[in-house]
Every structure is written in structure tokens, then in C-alpha cells.
Image (tube, coloured by chain):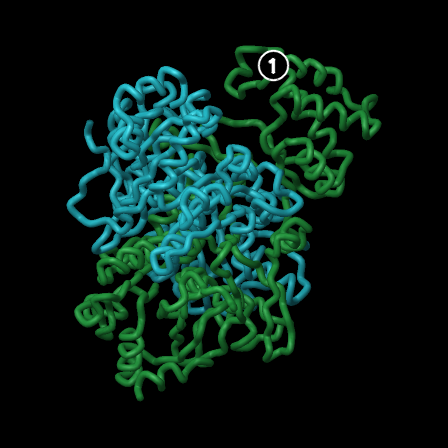
């Protein structure tokens, strides 16, 4: 039996930490991917009776290259890179006993089921504590584990809607544009990883475990603090005429500040004139009669005629090339950027080329995934293994870690326990 | 006895900047002593509106209030010899540094990681920059980072002639901080056993790139480009609407439409209870939902009847939305087991009874104004180690910390 834990030359920050992981989708799995990248042994537990498809991303497009099927989902592979995978049918008492043994040698248990599911399985926090007094348990769902809506269901777009993130993303006189993806699944995962790490650090310093109840919608509700305070302190509700206009900048106020069409179909440039000094630089690049007018030299005047100013900018950017124009503005000292398309930023932007890595999936082979946008000088992250196939590490976990022999493992598999 | 905070005992030095303020706040609210080092005259964000009571002033910026809860403030001019020495002395007492200075500025002052690492081998130094410490440093804002980092491409409207949209709330800086904080915690974990510090180099452009979900996944795996769609996921092909306007004018996310017989039956019963059977043209088709244990979204093309029933479920939700206020539709569907969401503004979310009962809105006392104001509360609920927010510091309010060191 090969030891599945990767031997890296560099030490890793979370070496020696073991996570018993029930997470799925991005909101949960994205968190334990970060922990795995930093060296934790993340053991992902899946239900063999539905082939792990509680995680709706398992076995759905986009496919990894030409592969198809349960192990070929590209999103699933991305979010679960670096983890181990086992199966446990928790309707069976023998599986429950194995889970108890696994919990007893784990540092943390992580899950993003609907509230109450772990209790129904018999593995709520009180039970987990009986197995291991200092266990760290982090649950993550949309509305949290208590309160009138604790039974309500959620996923990224719902968390975004209820928290205010959808409302604040859009243009005036239009419906909310919202986020064109599950921003709060990514961000919920960041908060979940943070919660696990804070609790583990506290445990390392005091020996004390605890439960962290993470409600994704509350995490999202902290991401508009200034606008929220404008309402609670000044009584100024966000639902008012002309708002939101998230391509403009409210805090700090800037003008012009927005996204404008450039030459070609669906080509755009973002420009932010931060202050009067930026304006002088911008006006020189524009170099048209309107940009030289004194009426625009102070922010207060630019802000009071923002619509008119934006029309002038739009007419100016329309015939230009977005890359060349952005570079010209940056060279002059004005923040600007082309709106990059996925292929451009992934395949052609050298500034972030370290982010895209290739992992080795034991069934579908090499596959590209996202890495982490950080570098640590002594304990950097590393990911080389793709998502685990269903039950791929049953032998290692049940055999090497929990001490079952091959025959016992085979019997459990035949009887549908694992 | 007050329980001990998770990060108590750690001292964090944060060089004041819009770009890293959230990272310091996340650590401070969990009990770390975060000392924000402000330049003479204060951090520039103190001058940003909106202001409390709309009165401009160094201590009145709501941006400052939000991002700097639970921190301490000292004013140090690191460009002077005395200030540089004060800064070095402060660092000698620190566990973590967080900075997002223009690249090269600290190095020119002899105050960068490279110059200080020898003396401070246990120090964890966190740099947040445009795309890494070895990169260039173009002028950038939240808007330009989200534009070149990917999120903007996916956000906007079905009408591709409308500009793509920057999601609100300065999320590019947030996302960089959301990577910085776990990295700091990993470094602290490792330091507990190794007694060694290290350098953490966070790329804001990389963080935006790593936070675009399917735009990246479709490209990495299939080289397909997603296109923007109103109020829902960008996708390589057009998808069905998920956002409707309710009778009270509020928008509503219909979430995952009903797919099984239990949900179809619950919808039907609700229409009966509301006395809307006659008006609801899709009511009869809903009855056919009884034969479906679960309609798979990928099976709709293969089974035309399933497609019709599925569509009827969506039509009925739209029908109900035209007759009910968004909040009633939200409660009604969720209580019947269907995932959906009201589109709240941030200030409406914080007043919702569920989040109020959970204690999400927190009162922060401003003794200087003899007033209490409601802030967004904890992003997570630790059972044993408290999350707490105290008001943001006045400029130089904790200057004594500098004097303590020099004595």
C-alpha cells in the first residue's frame, strides 16, 4: 500500500493536522482545499449509496478534457484537489463506528450540510465531543444553525440575494445584476478556512476545542459595512433613487469611475480617476477640448455632472483599443484596466501565471486547477493530487490509520458499508 | 470571567491602507492586539465619505469606523529618522505585520522585510500588493483589479451591450485579505512549533483571479467562455431567468425551482390556500408533478413531460411573485422546503428578524459621541472564543504605546 500523503521537501504549515471532512460544493470544499494546500491531511467522507453525488458538482460539466463520468467533473476536481477520499454509508452501524474512530484521530470535523443533518446522523457537536473532547467542529450553511430560518435552504446566489450582495451589484434603472457566479461560495469557503484555522490555533495554544457556527449570509453581511453604517448611523437607506450604481465609487467618491465600451464587440475598459491630480493626468491623455475645460478640474464639479462626464468618456473610449488605452493611462499614472476575458487572463497574463497549476488525477490524468494567490517563504502551499476518486483512499484510511486488514476492508465494501 | 479570545496575546502591526484594513479587522475582532500605524494627519480613508451625521472630520468617516473596529492607533512618520526608529521598536514587539505599501517604499526607508528579517526571525510579515512583491505596481483601484482579475467579465446583464458590472463593496481588497488572513493563521500555527516567522506575499490580482468560479472552470477544463446573464451565473450558453420582480417591486431570486412531487404538491396546496386556483393557468400541470420523485435538470430534454412540469413550477413561482410581496414569497417557499432568496439591500438584511435573533447586528458604543450605533456583527460564531467589536480608534489614540517602547 502506498502512503498517499505527499512527501514534500519543504515543511508545510499544517503538517500533522488531520481534518475529517464532510464538505462539498464550493462553499465547503473550497475551505478544506486551502487547508489541504497548506499540508493538512484532509479526509473527505462520501456516501457510497449515491456515489458521493450529494455534492452536485461531482460528475457534471465542465468536464476535464475528454473524460466523462463521476470522476471527470472539472469543478469538483478543482475544489477537491489535494484531499483524500473515503466512503462511509452512515446508515450502517459499522460505518458509524469507523467514523467514530476516524474522529478520534482527527483534529477537526468540517461540514456544510443543511442545519441539523449532522445531528440526525448522530454526529452533532455534543456527540463529537464525547468522541474527542478537544475536537474543532465547523459547520457552514446559509442561514446558520439557530434562528427562525435555520431550516431554510441556501446556495451561493441565495446567500448573495439575502445578504445584500446582489442588490449592490448593478446599474441604475436596471434589475440587480448580482454576481455572475457564486462569489459567496468562494467567500464562504474563505471564512470557513479562517474559522477552522482560528479554532485550531486556539486549540494548539490552550488545548480547548469548540464549535464554530458559520452562516454564509452573515459572513456576506459584513462585506458592505460602510453602506450599512450609512443606514444605521445616518438613516440613509440604500434603496433610493439612482442607487445602486456599482460601477461608480461611493466611498471614496471618484469621477469619472466606470466601465466603458471600446473598439470591437464586447470589449471594455475600466477607468478610475481617483482625485484632481489623476484628473490632470487623465485630461492630458484625452487631449480633447472638453478635457481641457476648467469646469472638470475639481472633483466636486465632476461628481455633480457625472452623467454628462461619463458620456464624454464613453465617446472617447469607443473607437480605441482597450489594451493600448489602458496601458497609456497606466503609464500616465491613472488606474485603468481592460476587462479581461477568461482566456486572456488565464492563458496570457504572465502576472498571474503561477496561479494555474496542473494536478494529477488518478483516473482522468493531468488537469488544470486554481492554486492559491499567496506565497509563503517558509511553508508555502502545494497541490499535486487531483480530487480523490470515490473511495480511493479507503485502504489507507481504514487499513493504515484505523488498523483494519485487507479482508475486513473487502468485506465492508462488499456489504455496502464503505 | 470573560472567556479568552482566540487570538489574545498576538500583536499585529498594520500600516494603514484601504487595501489591508479588512485583514487587520478580522484579526482584531477575534482578540489580536492590532496597532494601526497612521501617517501624520491620519490614514487617507479617514477623509472618505459618508461621514457620521454627514459632518466631515477625521473621526467621522464611516469607512474608517467599519474597517478599523477593535484596533489601536498610533501616528508615526516613518519617513523621519525618529519615526523609523519608533516603527522598528514597535516591530520588535510584534508577531505579525500587515502592509500594502507601494512596492519599494519601505525598502527605500530601510524598513522592509528584507532589511528587518534578521533581527525579527519570529516575525510574520504580510505584504499585499498588485500581483506580488516581485511584480510591477501599476496604479490600481478595486474597480481596475476586478476588471483585469476576472470578476467583472461575469457580472452584468443578458443584454451584452450594457457594460459589465463591478460587484459592490470593494470586494477586490476584501478577497486579497480573505487570502492573507488564513495564510497568517497558518504561519502562526507553524510558528507555535518551529519558533520561526516568515514572509507572506499576497497578490490582489491573483486573489481576484482565484475567485471567479465557473468563468475560470469552463476555461481551464473546456476552453469555453462564459457570457453575462442578468442576476444569475454567467455560462457558455444562455440559461433561464432566476430573478423576478414581486408585487411590492422588490426583486427575488427563485433559486432552484421545484423538482420533486413533494415540492409540486406543496406549491399546489399553497395556491389553493391563497384561493388562486382559478387564476393560475399552470395549476393543472402541477398535478402531473406527482409522478416525479425528482426531475434531473439534465434530463429535461429527454423527457418532454418532465420539461413541462418543471416549467410549470417556475411559472407558478413567477405567478405568485406577481401577487405577493417578496418577503411573503420568500417565507412561503422556504417554509415549504424550496430554496430561494429575497433580494435585500445590506441595511435591510441587518434588520431581518432571523439575523436579529441570532445577534448579527451588534451595538458599538462611541463614548466620545455618547451614542451607540449598530454595526454588522460576527461573520462566524465561535462557541468559546468571543468575537467582539469596539469602536475604531481616534488618530493617535494609543500613542502611549510608542512612548512605552522608547522608555
Image colour assigned to chain A: cyan
In the image, is B16 to the left or to the right of B245? left
Residue at the (34%, 45%) spot, across then down: A35
The image position of residue B119, as x and y in percent, is 19, 72
Residue ID for mark 1: B306
Query: Which picture quadrant has residue B282?
Result: top right
The image position of residue A321, as x and y in percent, is 37, 44
The image position of residue B135, as x and y in percent, is 25, 55
Q: Quadrant of the N terminus of chain A?
A: top left
In the image, is A227 to the left or to the right of B127? right
Q: Nearer the viewer, residue B140 or A327?
A: B140
Image colour assigned to chain B: green
In the image, is B268 to the left or to the right of B64? right
Q: Quadrant of the C terminus of chain A?
A: top left
> Does residue A341 show up?
no
> Does residue A393 show up?
yes
Residue at the (26%, 60%) spot, across then down: B191
Residue at the (30%, 32%) spot, across then down: A397
Element assignment for label 1: helix
Q: Nearer the viewer, residue A172 or A234?
A: A234
Q: Nearer the viewer, residue A235 or B74?
A: B74
Amino acid at each position: 500500500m502506498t502512503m498517499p500523503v505527499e512527501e514534500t521537501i519543504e515543511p508545510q504549515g499544517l503538517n500533522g493536522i488531520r481534518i475529517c471532512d464532510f464538505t462539498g460544493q464550493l462553499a465547503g470544499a473550497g475551505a478544506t482545499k486551502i487547508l489541504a494546500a497548506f499540508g493538512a491531511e484532509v479526509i473527505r467522507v462520501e456516501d457510497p449509496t449515491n456515489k458521493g453525488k450529494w455534492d452536485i458538482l461531482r460528475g457534471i460539466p465542465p468536464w476535464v478534457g475528454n473524460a466523462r463520468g463521476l470522476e471527470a467533473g472539472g469543478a469538483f476536481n478543482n475544489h477537491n484537489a489535494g484531499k483524500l477520499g473515503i466512503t462511509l454509508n452512515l446508515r450502517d452501524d459499522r460505518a458509524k463506528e469507523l467514523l467514530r474512530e476516524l474522529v478520534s484521530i482527527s483534529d477537526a470535523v468540517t461540514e456544510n450540510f443543511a442545519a441539523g443533518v449532522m445531528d440526525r446522523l448522530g454526529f452533532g457537536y455534543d456527540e463529537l465531543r464525547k468522541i474527542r473532547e478537544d475536537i474543532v467542529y465547523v459547520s457552514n450553511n446559509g442561514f446558520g444553525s439557530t434562528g427562525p430560518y435555520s431550516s431554510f435552504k441556501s446556495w451561493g446566489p441565495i446567500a448573495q440575494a439575502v445578504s445584500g450582495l446582489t442588490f449592490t451589484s448593478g446599474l441604475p434603472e436596471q434589475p440587480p445584476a448580482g454576481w455572475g457566479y457564486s462569489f459567496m461560495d468562494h467567500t464562504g469557503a474563505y471564512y470557513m478556512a479562517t474559522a477552522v484555522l482560528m479554532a485550531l490555533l486556539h486549540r494548539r495554544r490552550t488545548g480547548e476545542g469548540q464549535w464554530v457556527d458559520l452562516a454564509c449570509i452573515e459572513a456576506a453581511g459584513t462585506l458592505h459595512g460602510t453602506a450599512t453604517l450609512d443606514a444605521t448611523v445616518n438613516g440613509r437607506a440604500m434603496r433610493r433613487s439612482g442607487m445602486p450604481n456599482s460601477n461608480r465609487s461611493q466611498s471614496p467618491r471618484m469621477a469619472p469611475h466606470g466601465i466603458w465600451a471600446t473598439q470591437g464587440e464586447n470589449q471594455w475598459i475600466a477607468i478610475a480617476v481617483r482625485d484632481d491630480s489623476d484628473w490632470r493626468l487623465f485630461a492630458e491623455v484625452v487631449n480633447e477640448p472638453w478635457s481641457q475645460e476648467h469646469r472638470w478640474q475639481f472633483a466636486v464639479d465632476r461628481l455633480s455632472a457625472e452623467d454628462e462626464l461619463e458620456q464624454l468618456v464613453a465617446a472617447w473610449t469607443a473607437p480605441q483599443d482597450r489594451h493600448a488605452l489602458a496601458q497609456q493611462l497606466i503609464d500616465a499614472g491613472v488606474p485603468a484596466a481592460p476587462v479581461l476575458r477568461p482566456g486572456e487572463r488565464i492563458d496570457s497574463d504572465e502576472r498571474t501565471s503561477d496561479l494555474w497549476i496542473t494536478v494529477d488525477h488518478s483516473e482522468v490524468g493531468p488537469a488544470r486547477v486554481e492554486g492559491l494567490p499567496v506565497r509563503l517563504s517558509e511553508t508555502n502551499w502545494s497541490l499535486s493530487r487531483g480530487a480523490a476518486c470515490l473511495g480511493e483512499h479507503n485502504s489507507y484510511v481504514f487499513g493504515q490509520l484505523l488498523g483494519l486488514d485487507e479482508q475486513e476492508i473487502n468485506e465492508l465494501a462488499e456489504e455496502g458499508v464503505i | 470571567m470573560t472567556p479568552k479570545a482566540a487570538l489574545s496575546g498576538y500583536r499585529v502591526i498594520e500600516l494603514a491602507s484601504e487595501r489591508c484594513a479588512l485583514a487587520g479587522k478580522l484579526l482584531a475582532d477575534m482578540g489580536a492586539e492590532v496597532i494601526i500605524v497612521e501617517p501624520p494627519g491620519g490614514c487617507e480613508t479617514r477623509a472618505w465619505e459618508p461621514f457620521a451625521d454627514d459632518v466631515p472630520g477625521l473621526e467621522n468617516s464611516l469607512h474608517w469606523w467599519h474597517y478599523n473596529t477593535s484596533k489601536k492607533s498610533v501616528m508615526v512618520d516613518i519617513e523621519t529618522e525618529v519615526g523609523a526608529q519608533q516603527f522598528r521598536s514597535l516591530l520588535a514587539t510584534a508577531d505579525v505585520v500587515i502592509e500594502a505599501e507601494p512596492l519599494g517604499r519601505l525598502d527605500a526607508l530601510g524598513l522592509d522585510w528584507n532589511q528587518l528579517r534578521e533581527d525579527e526571525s519570529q516575525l510574520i510579515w504580510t505584504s499585499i500588493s498588485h500581483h506580488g512583491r516581485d511584480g510591477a505596481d501599476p496604479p490600481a483601484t478595486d474597480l481596475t483589479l476586478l476588471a483585469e482579475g476576472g470578476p467583472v467579465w461575469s457580472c452584468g446583464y443578458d443584454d451584452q451591450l450594457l457594460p459589465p458590472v463591478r460587484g459592490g463593496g470593494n470586494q477586490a481588497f476584501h478577497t486579497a485579505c480573505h487570502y492573507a488572513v488564513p495564510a497568517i493563521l497558518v504561519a502562526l500555527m507553524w510558528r507555535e512549533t518551529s519558533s520561526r516567522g516568515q514572509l507572506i506575499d499576497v497578490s490582489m490580482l491573483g486573489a481576484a483571479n482565484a475567485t471567479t468560479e465557473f468563468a475560470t472552470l469552463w476555461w481551464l477544463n473546456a476552453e469555453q467562455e462564459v457570457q453575462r446573464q442578468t442576476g444569475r451565473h454567467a455560462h457558455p450558453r444562455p440559461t433561464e431567468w432566476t430573478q423576478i420582480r414581486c408585487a411590492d417591486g422588490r426583486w427575488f431570486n427563485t433559486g432552484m425551482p421545484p423538482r420533486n412531487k413533494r415540492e409540486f404538491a406543496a406549491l399546489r396546496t399553497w395556491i389553493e390556500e391563497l384561493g388562486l386556483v382559478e387564476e393560475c393557468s399552470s395549476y393543472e400541470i402541477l398535478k402531473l408533478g406527482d409522478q416525479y420523485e425528482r426531475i434531473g435538470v439534465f434530463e429535461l430534454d429527454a423527457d418532454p413531460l418532465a420539461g413541462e412540469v418543471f416549467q410549470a413550477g417556475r411559472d407558478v413561482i413567477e405567478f405568485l411573485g406577481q401577487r405577493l410581496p417578496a418577503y411573503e414569497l420568500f417565507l412561503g417557499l422556504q417554509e415549504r422546503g424550496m430554496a430561494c432568496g429575497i433580494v435585500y439591500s445590506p441595511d435591510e438584511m441587518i434588520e431581518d428578524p432571523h439575523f436579529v435573533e441570532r445577534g448579527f447586528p451588534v451595538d458599538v458604543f462611541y463614548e466620545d459621541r455618547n451614542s451607540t450605533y449598530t454595526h454588522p456583527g460576527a461573520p462566524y460564531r465561535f462557541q468559546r472564543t468571543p468575537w467582539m467589536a469596539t469602536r475604531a480608534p481616534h488618530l493617535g489614540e494609543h500613542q502611549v504605546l510608542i512612548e512605552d517602547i522608547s522608555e
